[in-house]
Image (cartoon, grey):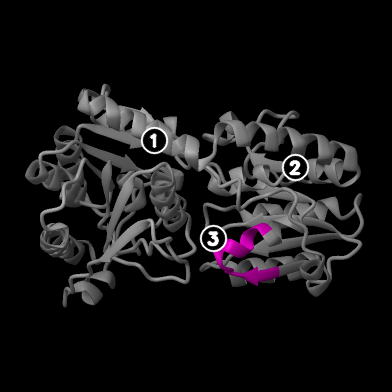
Amino acid sequence: MHILYVCADWEVDVLGRSGSSVHVRQMCETFASLGHHVTLCCANAGGPARLSKRVQLHVFAPKLRLREWLRSWFPRPGAHPVDSRSQRTGAKTTDSRLPLRSVATALDYAARRMRLWQFRRMVLNALGDRRVDLVYERASLFSLVGPKLGKVLHVPVLIEFNAPFALEFPDRGRLFKKALLGWETAVLASSDAAVCVSEQLADWLLKAHPFASKKLHVVPNGVAPGLFDPTICSPSLQSQLGLNGKTVIGFVGTMKAWHDVATLIGALKIAGADAADLCLLAVGDGPRRLEFERQSQLCGIEAIFVGAVDYEQIPDYISVMDIAVAPHPKLATFYFSPIKVFEYMCMAKPVIASSVGQLEEVIRDGVTGILVPPEDPVALAKAVVALSQSPTLRDRLGEAAHDWVSKSHTWEITAREVLSIAKSLTL
């Protein structure tokens, strides 16, 4: 099968370090490893990662002169409801620039449509006369590239949703919401099937588009067991970071508000009274990194913030962690499928996670990890102390987590489920 994978979102650098980037690469590589020919067409390939020769990469980045001006009026795409007061509290917000935002919204919409039209033309030119059997598009704002390509090429179209866009772009106003609803309706109606990474995301889409109930399928994210091997040992890295003899509490992720590192730091301050030699190892970067570093200093806890590292180096950093933590705040809709948690588990690390969204399905409390209420530093501290004082408990939870995730949430399993859906479209 020749799979045309389309990622028209210029905010997703497919060779980058973000979870979105990892998802695109792993799906393409896994499709190829299963014997399929994969052509990846994207709008942004920035980043240090590399794709194997099995995946043919095409990068198309049409330029828009209005782009930088428009960005000054909008939050960066990918903003999360936790950064929006209206989404956190339900309160209405006012903005003195609202009339200008309405004009900018219309211009932004027109600019995006033009760029997507250019992108689609470039994809068709790159394909030439080559036959395609499936168009697989990672949904991006206002993009109908996948369905339109499917119509031209006369092949099935499968759309992958990773987030509810109404939450990714908060406080845009009625004009934007109306355009967004119309786009979602069009993309669901014109595609043959849609994949969501979580039940919560599928429920969100179904509330607005009940007609799509037969098209929606839930396929969670996965992990690469060949990369995240529990036998990896990095004593040199441990010595380099000065972690010998310490109980390392690890976090991997973007330093943004939907990763509640603030509560984790508060919990470690509390836990320090009952557990000695605790050290926070935070891997990742983001707009709140300096804030978290200052908080850890004020709380008097030992913390090492290493910043962003290449994806292939993440297993080495996880290997030196004794306990891995996935803290998240209270959100009205927690729609994520936690790639980093799968990676912790695959490396047989005991995981402490907030009891929100898909995490409640992924982790069996007391069996494959420990669940704690979100934004509760006392409960989190209690879990940290319990694990730090019991190596036996850490081993038991880690081994159970590894056994479970390696049988149910690898990228191969994810890809096979998607291919099964695609095959049903051609029968």
Q: Residue visible at 15% across and 52% down?
A: 130
- Circle 2: residue type: Pro
Between 352 and 75, the one nearer to me in the picture: 352
Say which residue label 2 marks. Answer: 350
Q: Earlier in the sequence, mark 1 or mark 2?
A: 1
Residue 39 shown left or right of residue 86 in the figure: left
Between 250 and 407, the one nearer to me in the picture: 407
| Residue 206 in view here | no
Q: Is residue 115 above or below residue 195?
A: below
What residue span does the magenta drawing correspond to? 305-315
- Circle 1: residue type: Leu
Between 314 and 63, the one nearer to me in the picture: 314
For residue 349, what is the image quadrant?
top right
Q: Residues within 10 Å of mark 3 (few under 14, many from 20)?
A: many
Q: Residue furthest front?
A: 35
Q: Position of residue 389 (x, y in %)?
A: 91, 44
Say which residue label 3 marks. Answer: 254
Please check the rendered image and state whether residue 308 is part of the magenta-colored stretch, yes or no. Answer: yes
Please check the rendered image and state whether residue 277 is part of the magenta-colored stretch, yes or no. Answer: no
Say which residue label 1 marks. Answer: 201
Q: Secondary structure at mark 1?
A: helix
- Residue at mark 2 to residue at mark 3: CA–CA distance: 20 Å
